[in-house]
Amino acid sequence: MAEKGKKMIYYILPVLSIGILVVLWGVLCVQKPDIMPTPAAVIKKIADITVNPISNATLPVHILVSLGRVLSAFAAACVFGIVLGILMGWYPTFHDIAWPVFEIIRPIPPIAWIPLIILWCGIGETSKVIIVFIGAVVPIVLNTYSGIRQVDPMLFKAAKSVGAGDRATMFEVVLPASLPSIVAGMKTSLSTGWMCVLAAEMVVARQGVGFLIVRGMDSGDSALILSGMVVIGVVSALITALLNRAEVKLCPWRTEQR
């Protein structure tokens, strides 16, 4: 019974927190009715743009456009970032060569790259994906590198004691031990990717959720602005939930420890 009650709490608390957020939103609407649309107005706006196109695209199309940009860059960032993080964490010589360059580039905000990327690649899809990639790759590199460096030295000794070579140690000891850190980096990367794609779409785009927010700002439609924000939150939360499920499959020992 105690275990059942615990599971019920896990289901109730998220619903309760969302309910509190909606209540606070409603209170703010009462305080600032001229600039803050009600939840009902936002829901109505979402329903409206779902069937009535803006810039020749309905809301599902705008979501798919933004999602395609984010996931394309995210996939590339995962491959490049994990490989780079492993190389820097595993090979001291490579770390000494690559880390200073990475540390110089890392603090530069992805938004600062927008003018250069537009000059180099134009205003097409490539430029938007590159901007998202720049922001999404950093958390993955850092978390992968940290995960490799923080592997328990006892695991290395255990691997050597059974005669495991470098390759076997990497794939059977180091990578499994680093997976939780890598997945955490992927989650952060996904959130950063959404922020970057919004910045890119606000500057150069005719479709996408960021474009909807800019359209709402230009027309003074606060309901449209909040609709875009709500959509971003929901879509990002769904993708994060998928990553959480993947983490359970990849790192079952972490679930057992909770």
Image: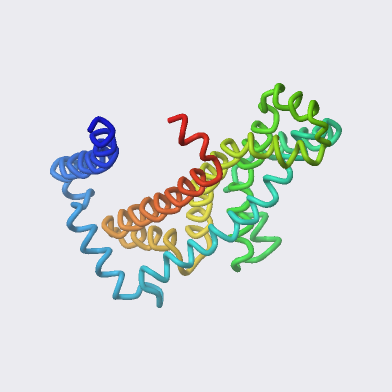
Across and down, in percent, residue 153 comes to 71, 22
Residue at image position (54%, 39%) is 184
**What's the image's color scheme?**
rainbow
Residue 200 in the figure: left or right of residue 226: right
Where residue 94 sits, quadrant-wise, is top right
Q: Residue furthest bottom?
A: 56
In this picture, residue 123 sits left or right of residue 194: right
Task: Return the residue nearer the eye: 59 or 80.
Answer: 80
Q: Which residue lies furthest to the front in this view?
A: 162
Where is residue 191? Give x, y as percent.
49, 46
* Residue 201 horizontal/vertical position (percent): 50, 60
Q: Where is residue 249 in the image (x, y as percent from the top left)?
A: 51, 47
Residue for point 45% across, 64% down? 208
Which part of the image, by quadrant, shows the C terminus? top left
Q: Which residue lies furthest to the right in this view?
A: 93
* 52 or 157: nearer the viewer: 157
The answer to which image quadrant residue 14 occupies is: top left
For the point 45% across and 67% down, the residue is 64
- 204 lies left or right of 96: left
* Residue 200, placed above or below residue 149: below
Q: Is residue 151 in view? A: yes
Image quarter where the N terminus lies is top left
Q: Which of 25 and 178 is in front in this view?
A: 178
Quarter where residue 13 is shown? top left
Does any portion of residue 107 appear in the rendered image? no
